[in-house]
Amino acid sequence: MESVARAARVAKGLVFHHFGTKQALYRAVLERIYAELRARQDATDLSGLGPVAGMRHLATDTFRIFRERPEIVALMNEENLHRARNIRRSASIPALYNPLLDAIEKLLAAGRAENLFRADVDPVALYVALSGLGYFYCANRWTLGAAFAGDLFRPDRIEGYETLVGDMVVAYLTAR
C-alpha cells in the first residue's frame, strides 16, 4: 500500500480509505486489467468480418493483447497461484465474459449456417484454447527462449506465431 501511495503521490491513509484492504486494492487492479482485456477484445466488430476471418482475428488479437500487456500475464499467473480467490470475490470479472461468449457463439452460428464450421464446438472450450495459445507463449517466453527457441518476441517469430494461432483455430473449426 505504501508503494502504491508513493506512486500515486497520495497519503497511504487515502489508499486505505479508498480501497480498505490490500486484497480490495489487488481485486480492483484485477478488475481493471480484465476490463481492459475485454474492452480490447470487444473493440472489433467480429461479426462484420465473417465467421472465418472473425475467429482468426479473435485468436490473433488475444495473442497480441497478452504480448503487448505482459502485466496481464503476470497478474493471471499470480491469481492462478491463489486459485482465483480474488476473481471469485469479484462480481464484475465473470460478467465481462458474457459479451465475448455471445460474439463467439454468433461467429460459430454464422460459420455453421454457411456450412463452414463443425457443429460440435463448445464456445467456452474454444475460448480457453485460443486464449491458451496466446497466454502460454507469453507466460513462458523466457523459459522457452532459454531452452531452445531464442527470442520469441522477435518480429519474424511473432508474425509466424500469429499466423500459426489463426490457422490452428480455423483448422479446428473447419475440420469435418
Image: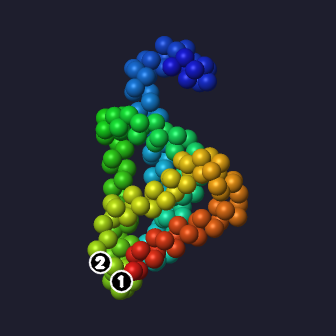
Instruction: Classify mark 1: helix, strand or loop.
Output: loop
Coloring applied to the structure = rainbow
Residue in front for this viewpoint, 5 or 141: 141
In this figure, which residue is indicated by the disc labeled 1?
A: 176
Callout 2 amino acid = Ala
Q: Position of residue 126 (x, y in %)?
A: 38, 64
Residue in front for this viewpoint, 146 or 128: 146
Q: Residue furthest front?
A: 147
At 52% from the left and 44% from the top, the residue drawn is 72
Instruction: Please rate how many residues cluster around mark 2, counting C-alpha atoms within 10 Å: few if below 14, some from 14 to 19, many from 20.
Output: some
Instruction: Please rate how many residues cluster around mark 1, counting C-alpha atoms within 10 Å: few if below 14, some from 14 to 19, many from 20.
Output: few
In this figure, which residue is indicated by the disc labeled 2?
A: 119
Depth check, mark 1 against mark 2: the one in front is: 1
- Distance CA(mark 1)–CA(mark 2): 9 Å
Q: Residue furthest bottom?
A: 115
Residue in front for this viewpoint, 39 or 145: 145
Q: Quadrant of the C terminus?
A: bottom left
Callout 1 amino acid = Arg
Residue 70 sits in quarter: top right
